[in-house]
Image (cartoon, helix red, strand yellow):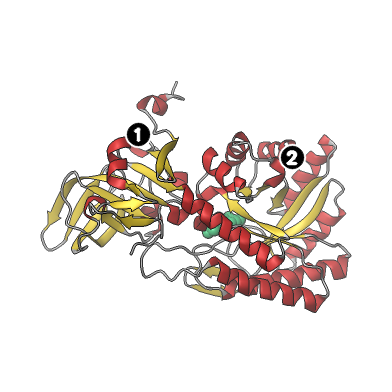
Protein backbone atom coordinates (compact mmCIF):
# COMPACT_ATOMS: atom_id res chain seq x y z
CA UNK A 1 0.00 0.00 0.00
CA UNK A 2 2.82 2.42 0.83
CA UNK A 3 6.23 2.94 -0.73
CA UNK A 4 7.99 0.87 1.93
CA UNK A 5 7.08 -2.54 3.33
CA UNK A 6 7.76 -1.29 6.88
CA UNK A 7 4.72 1.01 6.63
CA UNK A 8 1.11 0.07 7.23
CA UNK A 9 -2.16 1.35 8.73
CA UNK A 10 -3.60 0.19 12.07
CA UNK A 11 -7.19 -0.21 13.26
CA UNK A 12 -7.34 3.48 14.23
CA UNK A 13 -6.51 4.42 10.65
CA UNK A 14 -3.08 5.65 11.73
CA UNK A 15 0.10 5.17 9.73
CA UNK A 16 2.45 2.68 11.40
CA UNK A 17 6.16 2.07 10.92
CA UNK A 18 7.39 -1.41 11.83
CA UNK A 19 4.31 -1.81 14.00
CA UNK A 20 4.56 1.52 15.86
CA UNK A 21 1.74 4.05 15.64
CA UNK A 22 3.23 7.22 14.12
CA UNK A 23 0.60 9.46 15.71
CA UNK A 24 1.57 8.12 19.14
CA UNK A 25 5.25 8.68 18.28
CA UNK A 26 4.52 12.28 17.31
CA UNK A 27 2.71 12.77 20.61
CA UNK A 28 5.46 11.15 22.67
CA UNK A 29 8.48 12.81 21.06
CA UNK A 30 7.03 15.93 19.43
CA UNK A 31 7.42 17.09 15.83
CA UNK A 32 9.25 17.45 13.55
CA UNK A 33 10.62 13.97 14.12
CA UNK A 34 12.76 11.64 12.04
CA UNK A 35 11.69 8.02 12.53
CA UNK A 36 13.80 5.11 11.29
CA UNK A 37 13.06 1.39 11.29
CA UNK A 38 15.98 -0.69 12.52
CA UNK A 39 14.15 -3.84 11.40
CA UNK A 40 14.02 -2.52 7.85
CA UNK A 41 17.66 -1.36 7.84
CA UNK A 42 18.86 -4.73 9.11
CA UNK A 43 16.71 -6.59 6.63
CA UNK A 44 18.18 -4.57 3.75
CA UNK A 45 21.75 -5.08 4.99
CA UNK A 46 21.14 -8.83 5.16
CA UNK A 47 19.80 -8.91 1.63
CA UNK A 48 22.90 -7.12 0.30
CA UNK A 49 25.20 -9.35 2.30
CA UNK A 50 23.37 -12.49 1.17
CA UNK A 51 23.71 -11.47 -2.46
CA UNK A 52 27.48 -10.98 -2.15
CA UNK A 53 27.63 -14.42 -0.57
CA UNK A 54 25.47 -15.91 -3.25
CA UNK A 55 26.93 -14.34 -6.35
CA UNK A 56 30.58 -13.93 -5.35
CA UNK A 57 30.97 -16.77 -2.86
CA UNK A 58 31.34 -14.24 -0.06
CA UNK A 59 34.47 -12.76 -1.69
CA UNK A 60 33.63 -9.10 -1.10
CA UNK A 61 31.27 -7.00 0.97
CA UNK A 62 28.62 -4.35 0.78
CA UNK A 63 29.89 -0.99 1.99
CA UNK A 64 27.40 1.46 3.50
CA UNK A 65 27.98 4.94 2.02
CA UNK A 66 27.49 6.68 5.34
CA UNK A 67 26.84 10.10 3.86
CA UNK A 68 23.24 8.96 3.32
CA UNK A 69 22.73 9.08 7.10
CA UNK A 70 25.79 9.33 9.30
CA UNK A 71 25.32 8.97 13.05
CA UNK A 72 26.79 6.61 15.62
CA UNK A 73 23.85 4.27 15.99
CA UNK A 74 23.39 3.72 12.26
CA UNK A 75 27.13 3.05 11.92
CA UNK A 76 26.79 0.44 14.69
CA UNK A 77 23.74 -1.19 13.16
CA UNK A 78 25.09 -1.58 9.62
CA UNK A 79 28.55 -2.74 10.70
CA UNK A 80 27.01 -5.27 13.09
CA UNK A 81 25.40 -6.74 9.96
CA UNK A 82 28.84 -7.20 8.40
CA UNK A 83 28.88 -4.15 6.12
CA UNK A 84 31.93 -1.93 5.70
CA UNK A 85 31.61 1.86 5.83
CA UNK A 86 32.48 4.52 3.33
CA UNK A 87 33.24 8.02 4.63
CA UNK A 88 33.94 11.20 2.69
CA UNK A 89 35.09 13.58 5.37
CA UNK A 90 36.98 13.76 8.63
CA UNK A 91 33.64 14.25 10.35
CA UNK A 92 32.13 11.07 8.92
CA UNK A 93 35.33 9.22 9.82
CA UNK A 94 35.17 10.59 13.37
CA UNK A 95 31.52 9.52 13.66
CA UNK A 96 32.32 5.98 12.51
CA UNK A 97 35.33 5.65 14.81
CA UNK A 98 33.33 7.07 17.73
CA UNK A 99 30.74 4.38 17.09
CA UNK A 100 33.48 1.80 17.59
CA UNK A 101 33.77 0.78 13.93
CA UNK A 102 37.02 -1.05 13.16
CA UNK A 103 39.09 1.32 10.98
CA UNK A 104 40.13 -1.53 8.70
CA UNK A 105 36.52 -1.68 7.51
CA UNK A 106 36.37 2.01 6.66
CA UNK A 107 37.03 3.33 3.15
CA UNK A 108 37.91 7.00 2.80
CA UNK A 109 36.57 8.81 -0.29
CA UNK A 110 36.19 12.40 -1.39
CA UNK A 111 37.27 14.65 -4.23
CA UNK A 112 39.19 17.21 -2.18
CA UNK A 113 40.46 15.66 1.00
CA UNK A 114 42.35 18.14 3.14
CA UNK A 115 45.84 17.43 4.42
CA UNK A 116 44.37 17.06 7.88
CA UNK A 117 41.82 14.53 6.63
CA UNK A 118 44.47 12.49 4.84
CA UNK A 119 46.63 12.45 7.98
CA UNK A 120 43.64 11.51 10.10
CA UNK A 121 42.70 8.65 7.76
CA UNK A 122 46.27 7.32 7.73
CA UNK A 123 46.69 7.66 11.49
CA UNK A 124 43.39 5.86 12.08
CA UNK A 125 44.45 2.98 9.84
CA UNK A 126 41.51 3.00 7.44
CA UNK A 127 41.16 0.04 5.08
CA UNK A 128 41.96 2.18 2.06
CA UNK A 129 41.90 5.72 0.78
CA UNK A 130 40.16 6.12 -2.55
CA UNK A 131 42.35 8.52 -4.50
CA UNK A 132 40.60 11.12 -6.60
CA UNK A 133 43.40 12.89 -8.50
CA UNK A 134 47.14 13.06 -9.05
CA UNK A 135 47.99 15.87 -6.66
CA UNK A 136 46.16 13.97 -3.97
CA UNK A 137 48.15 10.86 -4.80
CA UNK A 138 51.36 12.89 -4.29
CA UNK A 139 50.06 14.21 -0.98
CA UNK A 140 49.19 10.71 0.28
CA UNK A 141 52.60 9.41 -0.83
CA UNK A 142 54.37 12.30 0.94
CA UNK A 143 52.43 11.98 4.20
CA UNK A 144 52.87 8.19 4.20
CA UNK A 145 56.63 8.61 3.64
CA UNK A 146 56.86 11.08 6.52
CA UNK A 147 55.03 8.67 8.78
CA UNK A 148 57.05 5.72 7.50
CA UNK A 149 53.96 3.74 6.49
CA UNK A 150 52.58 2.20 3.33
CA UNK A 151 49.00 3.31 2.73
CA UNK A 152 46.54 1.09 0.88
CA UNK A 153 44.80 3.00 -1.86
CA UNK A 154 42.19 2.47 -4.54
CA UNK A 155 41.59 4.76 -7.47
CA UNK A 156 38.36 6.46 -8.35
CA UNK A 157 37.78 5.91 -12.05
CA UNK A 158 35.27 7.60 -14.33
CA UNK A 159 34.25 4.65 -16.46
CA UNK A 160 32.60 6.82 -19.11
CA UNK A 161 29.09 5.89 -18.10
CA UNK A 162 26.99 8.73 -16.87
CA UNK A 163 23.85 7.39 -15.27
CA UNK A 164 21.20 9.81 -14.28
CA UNK A 165 17.82 8.79 -13.03
CA UNK A 166 15.92 6.67 -15.55
CA UNK A 167 18.54 6.98 -18.27
CA UNK A 168 22.23 6.70 -18.88
CA UNK A 169 24.68 7.85 -21.46
CA UNK A 170 28.03 6.48 -22.42
CA UNK A 171 30.61 9.20 -22.92
CA UNK A 172 34.35 9.53 -22.88
CA UNK A 173 34.39 12.85 -21.14
CA UNK A 174 32.05 12.81 -18.25
CA UNK A 175 31.60 16.25 -16.81
CA UNK A 176 32.21 15.20 -13.23
CA UNK A 177 34.44 16.48 -10.49
CA UNK A 178 35.12 12.96 -9.24
CA UNK A 179 38.02 10.75 -10.22
CA UNK A 180 40.26 9.92 -13.17
CA UNK A 181 39.00 9.76 -16.75
CA UNK A 182 39.54 6.48 -18.51
CA UNK A 183 39.28 7.44 -22.16
CA UNK A 184 41.83 10.24 -22.07
CA UNK A 185 44.51 7.95 -20.62
CA UNK A 186 44.53 9.98 -17.41
CA UNK A 187 43.49 6.98 -15.32
CA UNK A 188 46.19 4.72 -16.74
CA UNK A 189 48.93 7.30 -16.18
CA UNK A 190 47.76 7.77 -12.60
CA UNK A 191 47.82 4.02 -12.01
CA UNK A 192 51.39 3.94 -13.40
CA UNK A 193 52.34 6.67 -10.89
CA UNK A 194 50.64 4.83 -8.05
CA UNK A 195 52.39 1.57 -8.87
CA UNK A 196 55.73 3.39 -8.91
CA UNK A 197 55.15 5.19 -5.61
CA UNK A 198 56.87 3.57 -2.64
CA UNK A 199 54.60 4.48 0.21
CA UNK A 200 51.26 3.58 -1.26
CA UNK A 201 49.99 0.16 -2.21
CA UNK A 202 47.42 0.19 -4.97
CA UNK A 203 44.91 -2.52 -4.13
CA UNK A 204 41.93 -1.76 -6.29
CA UNK A 205 39.71 0.36 -8.46
CA UNK A 206 36.53 2.17 -7.67
CA UNK A 207 33.68 3.64 -9.70
CA UNK A 208 30.31 5.14 -8.86
CA UNK A 209 28.15 6.02 -11.82
CA UNK A 210 25.27 7.94 -10.29
CA UNK A 211 22.40 7.75 -7.87
CA UNK A 212 18.75 6.70 -7.75
CA UNK A 213 19.29 4.48 -10.83
CA UNK A 214 16.49 2.09 -11.80
CA UNK A 215 18.14 0.48 -14.80
CA UNK A 216 20.44 -2.53 -14.52
CA UNK A 217 22.34 -2.02 -17.76
CA UNK A 218 24.58 0.91 -16.72
CA UNK A 219 25.83 -1.15 -13.77
CA UNK A 220 26.56 -4.09 -16.05
CA UNK A 221 28.38 -1.87 -18.51
CA UNK A 222 30.39 -0.23 -15.73
CA UNK A 223 31.49 -3.64 -14.44
CA UNK A 224 32.66 -4.61 -17.94
CA UNK A 225 34.54 -1.36 -18.49
CA UNK A 226 36.20 -1.57 -15.08
CA UNK A 227 37.32 -5.16 -15.58
CA UNK A 228 38.76 -4.34 -18.99
CA UNK A 229 40.83 -1.63 -17.30
CA UNK A 230 41.71 -3.96 -14.46
CA UNK A 231 43.04 -6.38 -17.06
CA UNK A 232 44.99 -3.67 -18.91
CA UNK A 233 46.78 -2.82 -15.65
CA UNK A 234 47.84 -6.43 -15.24
CA UNK A 235 48.74 -6.91 -18.89
CA UNK A 236 50.74 -3.71 -19.34
CA UNK A 237 52.11 -2.99 -15.91
CA UNK A 238 52.20 -6.47 -14.43
CA UNK A 239 50.30 -5.16 -11.44
CA UNK A 240 47.71 -7.49 -9.99
CA UNK A 241 44.99 -5.68 -8.08
CA UNK A 242 42.73 -7.44 -5.62
CA UNK A 243 39.71 -5.18 -5.08
CA UNK A 244 36.99 -3.81 -7.30
CA UNK A 245 34.39 -1.43 -5.91
CA UNK A 246 31.44 -1.01 -8.25
CA UNK A 247 29.81 1.81 -6.28
CA UNK A 248 26.25 2.45 -5.18
CA UNK A 249 23.33 4.27 -6.71
CA UNK A 250 20.53 1.72 -6.51
CA UNK A 251 17.15 3.42 -6.80
CA UNK A 252 14.47 3.36 -4.10
CA UNK A 253 10.76 4.08 -4.04
CA UNK A 254 9.73 7.64 -3.27
CA UNK A 255 6.42 7.37 -5.13
CA UNK A 256 4.29 4.36 -5.87
CA UNK A 257 5.15 4.65 -9.56
CA UNK A 258 8.90 4.24 -8.94
CA UNK A 259 9.88 0.90 -10.38
CA UNK A 260 12.72 0.00 -8.04
CA UNK A 261 14.62 -3.11 -9.11
CA UNK A 262 15.20 -5.73 -6.40
CA UNK A 263 18.87 -5.65 -5.28
CA UNK A 264 19.15 -9.34 -6.06
CA UNK A 265 18.35 -8.59 -9.69
CA UNK A 266 21.22 -6.11 -9.96
CA UNK A 267 23.56 -8.57 -8.31
CA UNK A 268 22.48 -11.34 -10.60
CA UNK A 269 23.14 -9.38 -13.80
CA UNK A 270 26.28 -7.57 -12.62
CA UNK A 271 27.86 -10.73 -11.23
CA UNK A 272 27.21 -12.53 -14.53
CA UNK A 273 29.12 -9.72 -16.28
CA UNK A 274 31.92 -9.87 -13.70
CA UNK A 275 32.30 -13.62 -14.08
CA UNK A 276 32.19 -13.44 -17.88
CA UNK A 277 34.79 -10.64 -18.04
CA UNK A 278 37.15 -12.40 -15.64
CA UNK A 279 36.88 -15.55 -17.68
CA UNK A 280 37.51 -13.65 -20.90
CA UNK A 281 40.72 -12.10 -19.52
CA UNK A 282 41.80 -15.09 -17.47
CA UNK A 283 41.62 -13.05 -14.25
CA UNK A 284 40.99 -14.32 -10.76
CA UNK A 285 37.76 -12.68 -9.62
CA UNK A 286 38.69 -9.73 -7.42
CA UNK A 287 37.02 -8.94 -4.12
CA UNK A 288 33.81 -7.24 -5.17
CA UNK A 289 32.46 -4.33 -3.20
CA UNK A 290 29.21 -2.50 -3.76
CA UNK A 291 28.54 0.76 -2.03
CA UNK A 292 24.87 1.54 -1.44
CA UNK A 293 23.83 4.48 0.70
CA UNK A 294 20.30 5.58 -0.15
CA UNK A 295 18.94 2.06 -0.53
CA UNK A 296 20.17 0.99 2.94
CA UNK A 297 18.37 3.71 4.88
CA UNK A 298 16.05 5.59 2.49
CA UNK A 299 12.86 3.54 2.68
CA UNK A 300 13.49 2.80 6.36
CA UNK A 301 12.82 6.41 7.34
CA UNK A 302 9.90 8.82 7.52
CA UNK A 303 9.53 12.33 8.89
CA UNK A 304 6.57 13.40 10.99
CA UNK A 305 5.37 17.00 11.12
CA UNK A 306 2.41 18.85 12.58
CA UNK A 307 0.17 20.70 10.14
CA UNK A 308 0.00 24.41 10.89
CA UNK A 309 -1.79 26.98 8.83
CA UNK A 310 -3.55 26.10 5.61
CA UNK A 311 -3.70 28.83 3.00
CA UNK A 312 -5.86 28.49 -0.09
CA UNK A 313 -5.15 30.87 -2.94
CA UNK A 314 -8.25 30.62 -5.15
CA UNK A 315 -7.55 29.21 -8.60
CA UNK A 316 -3.88 28.82 -7.70
CA UNK A 317 -3.17 26.29 -4.98
CA UNK A 318 -3.42 25.39 -1.32
CA UNK A 319 -0.36 25.68 0.86
CA UNK A 320 -0.28 23.34 3.83
CA UNK A 321 2.36 24.61 6.23
CA UNK A 322 4.31 22.24 8.46
CA UNK A 323 6.55 22.81 11.47
CA UNK A 324 9.69 21.76 9.54
CA UNK A 325 10.88 22.30 6.00
CA UNK A 326 14.06 22.74 4.00
CA UNK A 327 16.16 22.84 7.17
CA UNK A 328 15.34 19.20 7.93
CA UNK A 329 14.79 18.12 4.31
CA UNK A 330 16.33 20.34 1.60
CA UNK A 331 15.89 17.84 -1.22
CA UNK A 332 12.83 19.33 -2.89
CA UNK A 333 14.30 22.81 -2.69
CA UNK A 334 17.59 21.50 -4.11
CA UNK A 335 16.39 19.30 -6.93
CA UNK A 336 12.61 18.89 -6.86
CA UNK A 337 12.81 15.35 -5.56
CA UNK A 338 9.65 13.29 -5.34
CA UNK A 339 8.05 12.34 -2.06
CA UNK A 340 4.85 10.71 -0.91
CA UNK A 341 3.07 12.75 1.76
CA UNK A 342 0.04 11.74 3.78
CA UNK A 343 -1.97 12.63 6.85
CA UNK A 344 -0.78 10.01 9.34
CA UNK A 345 -3.85 10.24 11.59
CA UNK A 346 -6.22 9.59 8.65
CA UNK A 347 -4.00 7.31 6.59
CA UNK A 348 -6.95 5.04 5.78
CA UNK A 349 -8.86 7.87 4.07
CA UNK A 350 -8.63 8.62 0.35
CA UNK A 351 -5.93 11.08 -0.68
CA UNK A 352 -8.18 13.43 -2.62
CA UNK A 353 -6.91 16.85 -1.60
CA UNK A 354 -4.31 18.64 -3.70
CA UNK A 355 -1.77 20.35 -1.47
CA UNK A 356 1.57 22.09 -1.66
CA UNK A 357 3.51 21.24 1.47
CA UNK A 358 5.37 24.34 2.66
CA UNK A 359 8.06 24.63 5.31
CA UNK A 360 8.50 27.45 7.82
CA UNK A 361 11.73 28.96 6.47
CA UNK A 362 11.93 32.42 4.93
CA UNK A 363 12.36 31.18 1.36
CA UNK A 364 9.50 30.82 -1.09
CA UNK A 365 11.31 27.73 -2.40
CA UNK A 366 11.02 26.10 1.01
CA UNK A 367 8.63 23.38 -0.12
CA UNK A 368 8.57 19.64 0.48
CA UNK A 369 6.29 18.78 -2.43
CA UNK A 370 4.03 20.69 -4.80
CA UNK A 371 0.50 19.82 -5.86
CA UNK A 372 0.58 16.43 -4.25
CA UNK A 373 -2.49 14.42 -3.22
CA UNK A 374 -3.06 13.97 0.51
CA UNK A 375 -6.03 13.37 2.82
CA UNK A 376 -7.96 16.57 3.54
CA UNK A 377 -5.75 18.34 6.08
CA UNK A 378 -6.73 20.14 9.28
CA UNK A 379 -4.63 22.23 11.63
CA UNK A 380 -3.00 19.91 14.16
CA UNK A 381 -2.91 16.84 11.90
CA UNK A 382 0.27 14.80 11.69
CA UNK A 383 1.75 14.90 8.21
CA UNK A 384 4.14 12.09 7.28
CA UNK A 385 6.69 12.33 4.49
CA UNK A 386 7.85 8.88 3.39
CA UNK A 387 11.27 7.57 2.30
CA UNK A 388 13.19 10.29 4.10
CA UNK A 389 15.81 8.00 5.64
CA UNK A 390 18.55 9.01 3.20
CA UNK A 391 19.96 12.49 2.56
CA UNK A 392 17.55 14.24 4.93
CA UNK A 393 19.15 14.30 8.39
CA UNK A 394 22.56 14.25 6.71
CA UNK A 395 21.71 17.34 4.66
CA UNK A 396 19.88 19.21 7.42
CA UNK A 397 20.92 22.71 8.43
CA UNK A 398 20.08 25.29 11.05
CA UNK A 399 18.71 27.81 8.55
CA UNK A 400 16.65 30.49 10.29
CA UNK A 401 18.16 29.08 13.48
CA UNK A 402 15.79 26.18 13.44
CA UNK A 403 16.88 23.27 15.59
CA UNK A 404 17.49 19.90 13.95
CA UNK A 405 14.80 17.39 14.95
CA UNK A 406 15.41 14.29 17.04
CA UNK A 407 15.66 10.88 15.42
CA UNK A 408 13.86 7.88 16.87
CA UNK A 409 14.71 4.28 15.97
CA UNK A 410 12.09 1.53 15.92
CA UNK A 411 13.04 -2.05 16.71
CA UNK A 412 10.72 -4.93 17.64
CA UNK A 413 7.82 -2.55 18.19
CA UNK A 414 9.83 -0.37 20.62
CA UNK A 415 11.08 3.17 20.00
CA UNK A 416 14.23 4.81 21.31
CA UNK A 417 15.93 8.14 20.64
CA UNK A 418 19.19 7.71 18.70
CA UNK A 419 19.82 11.42 18.08
CA UNK A 420 18.57 14.01 20.52
CA UNK A 421 16.75 17.00 19.10
CA UNK A 422 18.83 20.15 19.20
CA UNK A 423 18.08 22.89 21.72
CA UNK A 424 18.38 26.66 21.38
CA UNK A 425 21.50 26.39 23.54
CA UNK A 426 23.04 24.11 20.89
CA UNK A 427 22.50 26.88 18.36
CA UNK A 428 24.72 29.35 20.19
CA UNK A 429 27.25 26.82 21.49
CA UNK A 430 30.02 28.08 19.21
CA UNK A 431 28.99 31.73 19.13
CA UNK A 432 31.46 34.05 20.86
C1 LIG B 1 27.01 8.81 -2.74
C2 LIG B 1 27.93 7.71 -3.05
C3 LIG B 1 27.53 6.39 -2.87
C4 LIG B 1 26.13 6.00 -2.47
O1 LIG B 1 25.20 6.38 -3.42
P1 LIG B 1 23.64 6.00 -3.21
O2 LIG B 1 22.99 6.57 -4.39
O3 LIG B 1 23.24 6.65 -1.94
O4 LIG B 1 23.58 4.52 -3.15
C5 LIG B 1 28.45 5.39 -3.09
N1 LIG B 1 29.71 5.68 -3.47
C6 LIG B 1 30.13 6.94 -3.66
C7 LIG B 1 31.51 7.21 -4.08
C8 LIG B 1 29.26 7.99 -3.46
O5 LIG B 1 29.69 9.25 -3.66
Q: In which of the image's four quarters is ligand 1 placed?
A: bottom right
Residue depicted at x 82% and y 56%? 193
| 35 relative to 276 in the view: left or right | left
Residue 30 at x, y percent in the picture:
30, 37
Residue 158 vertical position relative to residue 66 in the rendered view, above or below: below
Residue 106 at x, y percent in the picture:
67, 46
From where the camera sits, is residue 150 visible?
A: yes
Residue depicted at x 87% and y 48%? 198
Confirm or reject: label 2 Cβ below 8 Å from ligand 1: no
Q: Nearer the viewer, residue 178 or 49?
A: 49
CA distance separating discs 2 and 1 = 37 Å
Label 2 Cα crowd, 10 Å radius (few <14 / some 14-19 / many 20+):
some
State which quarter of the image contains the C terminus. top left
Q: Which residue in the structure is indicated by mark 2?
A: 125
| 279 relative to 404 in the view: left or right | right
Residue depicted at x 81% and y 76%? 281
Residue 305 at x, y percent in the picture:
29, 45
Q: For the image shown, how many numbered marks are present on the structure?
A: 2
Q: Nearer the viewer, residue 222 or 237?
A: 222
User: Sequence-wise, which precedes: disc 2 or disc 1?
Assistant: 2
Which label sits on residue 401? 1
| 138 relative to 196 in the view: left or right | left
Residue at the extreme right of the image, as rendered: 238
Residue 126 falls in which quadrant of the image? top right
Residue at the extreme left of the image, as rendered: 314
Residue 169 at x, y percent in the picture:
55, 74
Secondary structure at badge 2 equals loop
From where the camera sits, is residue 183 visible?
A: no
Residue 34 vertical position relative to residue 342 in the rendered view, above or below: above
Amino acid sequence: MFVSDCLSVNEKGHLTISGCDTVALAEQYGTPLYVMSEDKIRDTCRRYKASIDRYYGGNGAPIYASKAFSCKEICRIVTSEGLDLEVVSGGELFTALSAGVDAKHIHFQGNNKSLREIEYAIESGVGDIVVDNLSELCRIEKISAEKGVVTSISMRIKPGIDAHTHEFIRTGQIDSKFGFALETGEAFEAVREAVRAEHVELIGLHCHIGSQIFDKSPFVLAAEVMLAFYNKIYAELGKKLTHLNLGGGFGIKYKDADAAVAYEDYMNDVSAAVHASCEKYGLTIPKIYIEPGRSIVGEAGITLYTVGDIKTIPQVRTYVAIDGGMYDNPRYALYQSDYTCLIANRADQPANFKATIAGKCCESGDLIQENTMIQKPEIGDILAVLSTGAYNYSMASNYNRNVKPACVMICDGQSRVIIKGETYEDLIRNDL
